[in-house]
Image (cartoon, rainbow, N blue to C red):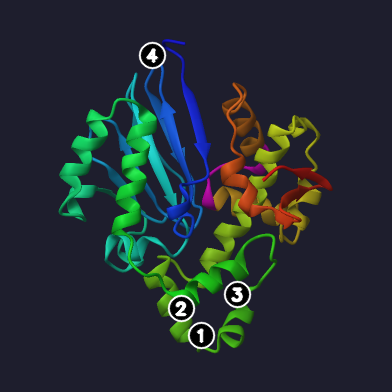
Amino acid sequence: MPGESSFVERAPAPALAAVASLVWIQQVGDEPLAQRHVPHGGAELRCVLGRTPQLLGPLTGAVYHDIPAGGTVVGVRLRPGAIAALAGMPADELVDQNLAGTEIWRDVNRLTDLLGEAATPRIALGHLQSFVARTAGPRDPLMDEAVRHLMPWRGGRPAALPAMLSISERQLRRRCRAAVGVGVKELHRILRLQGFIARVQASIDDRNGMNADLSRWATETGYTDQAHLGRECRRLIGVTPGELLAQTGAACACGHDHAASYAPMLRPGNGRFVLEGRPIPA
């Protein structure tokens, strides 16, 4: 409907599956919107149609970016470890940076034109995905394995990585910062919180958000207790877990489907993702 906002996210095109976790189209209604972005371990390439694409580097805390009234945004969320190969520079140089694409890629002006001239947002998103697919270079396979080990549903610990990967702690720290942008311990903290956020989003999609057991969710996602979760949530996002639950519920009241973002953070089983014993279609 005219004047209404919408947000649609989904899995990326097959050609991007190794480097991107999700893509999205967001259309803003009659009022401008301050969009919150929280740390997730990766980076994002996003474009308000009609403007130059922006690269939002790996985050260490929540940030807000304004979207104009009537604006349409297309975006690609990169997996942890993919940004260095796409930008052609060490990821730690991009941490907490929001850069115009022209500062990184020489051919981005052509991409800006393609996105602005696209007949529909879906076509524009296709152009953005094609740009990422042809621009991304080879990633560090050792860091890909490190990221898999630290995913919330794996329960891996940073201390186990040097022996598992047959690498010194110093080399691991250097390669993690170059590929991901932050150190191994910080990445673990970010992914652990994303595991909790996944539980929040899935519970709201399942219409059980009001029955949340924050204490149990905290321990199940790797925190010592609810107080530990609270400290980490305030540090990385700036709100308490309860506030996050309420804000997420309010933002998704119109039926936004966030399964593409939260499903990879939950435990896979038989091709489906399991939350509190209930299967959620992948």
Name the N-terminal-most of marks 2 and 3. 3
- The Cα–Cα distance between marks 2 and 3, rounded to whole angstroms, is 10 Å
Amino acid type, mark 4: Asp
Decide whether residue 33 is among the magenta residues.
no
The residue wearing badge 3 is: 158
Q: Is residue 166 visible?
A: yes
Q: Specify start and end residues of the magenta stretch as a single range.
A: 236-242
The residue wearing badge 2 is: 173
Residue beneath the point at 68% across and 38% down: 242
Residue beneath the point at 47% across and 46% down: 12
**Residue furthest toward the top?**
2
Q: Is residue 50 visible?
A: no
In the rendered image, the vertical position of residue 127 relative to residue 21, given as above or below: above
**Residue furthest toward the front?**
14
Name the N-terminal-most of marks 4 and 2. 4
Mark 2: few/some/many CA within 10 Å (<14, 14-19, 20+): some
The residue wearing badge 4 is: 30
In the rendered image, the vertical position of residue 223 relative to residue 173, given as above or below: above
Residue beneath the point at 60% across and 87% down: 163
Query: Tags 2 and 1 in contact by the CB under 8 Å rule?
Result: yes
